[in-house]
Image (spheres, helix red, strand yellow):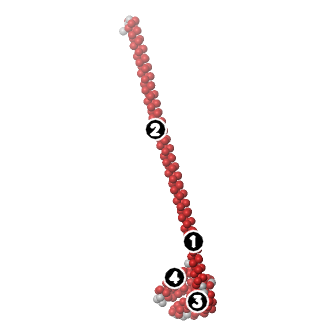
Amino acid sequence: LAPGDASPETWARWQQAELAAVFAGAAARAEAERDEEILRTRAEAAAAERAAAQAEAERRAAEETAAALAERDAAEQRDSELAAERAQREEEAARAAAEERRRELAEAHRRSFDPEAARQAAAMLERARVAVRAADDPAGSVTAHAHLAEVLRPLVLADPSHTAELIATLDALVGLRWRLGDAEGSRAAAREAKSLGS
């Protein structure tokens, strides 16, 4: 039906229907845009919430890590301080023990030192040395070295410079007694030499 063939009323209804369709389309697009905006806003809000939650989790994790590191450093510092205190106590105890040992040795020396025995030993020393050099068999050498050691002992108390000669004499006795089958005598000489050298 051509527009010219329609009555004015029919034409008016067509125009109204066309306008209604235009308005309906515009309304549908507007509603779709509103829905899209709502969805976009919700998505952005959800993304922001996730980002905030992740940032909070990272912040808490960083705080926990920092706290753990601080606790570890504090524990290491405490351990270091305790180790230093323990080392200091051990050093002080060692010094005290050494000082006590020094006093004990000094007291033992004071009690055992006999000036008369030292004078007699000094008079016998050269003859004892000659006897050691003159010994021509193992048994005689053992006897001569043992006598020299007896002479040197009181001299060591009076003058520690004789200590090296006493140790050398005892070391010689170790081998001589061992060769003669006197294992116990050899070990005794070795123990005495070791005690003098320590």
Q: Mark 1 and 4 residues: CB-CB less than 8 Å, in contact? A: no
* Nearer to us in this view, 99 or 186: 99
Q: Which residue is mark 3?
A: 151
What amino acid is labelled 4 in the image? Arg
**Viewer-nearest of labels 4 and 2?**
4
Question: Badge 3 local density, few (<14 within 10 Å), some, or many (20+)?
Answer: many
N-terminal label among 2 and 1: 2
Q: Quadrant of the C terminus?
A: bottom right
Which residue: 52% across, 49% down? 66
CA separation in Å, label 2 and label 3: 97 Å
Residue 33, picture quadrant: top left
The number of numbered discs placed on residues in the rendered structure image is 4
**Viewer-nearest of labels 2 and 1?**
1
Name the spot of residue 42 as percent of width and height, x first: 45, 31
N-terminal label among 1 and 4: 1
Q: Which residue is mark 2?
A: 50
Q: Which residue is mark 1?
A: 96
Name the spot of residue 153 as percent of width and height, x first: 58, 86
Residue 10, picture quadrant: top left
Q: Which numbered circle lies on residue 182?
A: none
In the image, residue 29 above or below residue 180: above
Q: Which numbered circle lies on residue 191?
A: 4
